[in-house]
């Protein structure tokens, strides 16, 4: 989950303030904060953080260690993280309704969020 929140934070940083994309930045910041909080609340204190490499693409790896989630909480955390991501993906297209020229970009961002996978070490 930390990997996903890390990607969201990285997406937020280059968005300058005072632009048409303030709403995107806000949604991404809120989503990232909620995912970080979810991971922290359910962290397994008995296990250390690890950096993970993708089995499908060894070149793809987390740039920061991931926080382990308690085994007893993993199913609930995955459901809540999915709900948080779905909410963000649903908010973005509605945010662009007032500005047609941004609708395509907001839809692309929403699609990227919707396609993200929650990474929890088991």
Image (cartoon, helix red, strand yellow):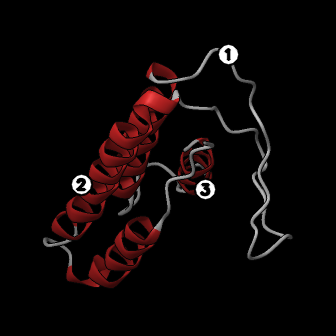
CA separation in Å, label 1 and label 2 = 31 Å
- Looking at the image, residue 62 lies above or below residue 93: above
Q: Which residue in the protein does label 1 denote?
A: 46
**Lower sequence index among marks 1 and 3:** 3
Hey, which residue is sitting farthest right in the picture?
59
Q: Which residue in the protein does label 3 denote?
A: 14
Q: Which mark is residue 67?
A: none
Q: Are marks 1 and 2 in contact (CB under 8 Å)?
A: no
Lateral position of residue 8 relative to residue 121, left or right: left
Residue lying at 37% horizontally and 46% vertically, measured from the top left: 81
Q: Which residue in the protein does label 2 denote?
A: 87
Q: Residues within 10 Å of mark 1 (few under 14, many from 20)?
A: few
**Quarter where residue 120 is shown:** top right
Residue lying at 86% horizontally and 70% vertically, measured from the top left: 59
- Looking at the image, residue 111 lies above or below residue 2: below
CA separation in Å, label 1 and label 3 = 36 Å
Q: Residues within 10 Å of mark 2 (few under 14, many from 20)?
A: some
**Lower sequence index among marks 2 and 3:** 3
The spot of residue 46 in percent (x, y) is: 67, 16
Lateral position of residue 90 relative to residue 7, left or right: left
Residue nearer the viewer, 61 or 9: 61
Q: Where's the N terminus, which quadrant?
A: top right
Q: Residues within 10 Å of mark 3 (few under 14, many from 20)?
A: few
Residue lying at 39% horizontally and 46% vertically, measured from the top left: 78
Residue nearer the viewer, 68 or 3: 68
Lateral position of residue 76 relative to residue 11, left or right: left
């Amino acid at each position: 989950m930390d990997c996903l929140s890390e990607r969201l934070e990285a997406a937020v940083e280059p968005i300058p303030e005072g632009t048409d994309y303030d709403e995107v930045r806000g949604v991404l910041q809120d989503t990232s904060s909620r995912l970080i909080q979810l991971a922290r609340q359910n962290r397994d204190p008995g296990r250390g953080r690890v950096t993970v490499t993708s089995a499908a693409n060894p070149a793809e790896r987390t740039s920061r260690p991931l926080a382990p989630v308690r085994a007893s909480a993993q199913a609930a955390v995955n459901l809540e993280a999915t709900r948080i991501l779905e909410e963000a993906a649903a908010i973005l297209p509605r945010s662009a309704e007032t500005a047609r020229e941004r609708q395509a970009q907001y839809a692309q961002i929403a699609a990227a969020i919707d396609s993200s996978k929650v990474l929890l070490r088991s």
